[in-house]
Amino acid sequence: QVQVVESGGGLVLPGRSLRLSCIVSGIDFNMRDYNVVGWYRQAPGKEREMIADVSKFGTLTHGPSMRDRFNVSRDNSKNAVYLQMNNLDPEDTGVYYCRLTVPGHTYWGQGTQVTVSS
C-alpha cells in the first residue's frame, strides 16, 4: 500500500526557517517507471496551489506558489522529498501537502500545518 506522509510543520516566527519532509512508502523510488513528487500549499480560504515538483531524475518544475526563499530537493535513497523554506513570512501560512504521481495513480498526503506568526 502506497503512503505519503508529510512532517516538519509547526508554528514559527517570521524570518525563521522550516524544513518539511515528505516520505513515501510502498513503492521503490528508483523504480523503472516515471514518478514525480510535488509540494503544494493551501492557504486559508484559498485553493491548493503547486509549489514545485521533482521527478525521479531530479527535474524540477516550479509552480505558482514557488518562492526564491524555497528549495525543493529529493533523496531517492530515502524515498524522501524535502521543502526547505527560509525567511518565512505570514503569507506562507497554510497546509502543505505532498503529492506522488506514478503512471495511472496519484497519492496525496494528509498535509502538515505551517503557521507563521509573531
Image: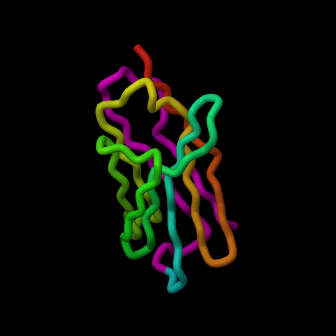
- The residues colored magenta run 1-30
Where residue 65 appears, x then y in whole percent? 46, 45
Query: Dividing the picture into quarters, in which one does residue 26 lie?
Result: bottom right
6 displayed left or right of 75: right
Quarter of the rendering occupied by the C terminus: top left
Point 49% across, 29% down: residue: 93
Point 30% across, 41% down: residue: 69
Point 39% across, 69% down: residue: 77
13 displayed left or right of 10: left
Residue farthest to the front, as pictured: 64
- Can you say whether 28 is above or below 61 in the image? below
Where residue 111 appears, x then y in whole percent? 60, 43
- Can you say whether 52 is above or below 68 in the image? below
Where residue 108 appears, x then y in whole percent? 64, 55
Count of labels in the image: 0
- Can you say whether 100 is above or below 27 in the image? above
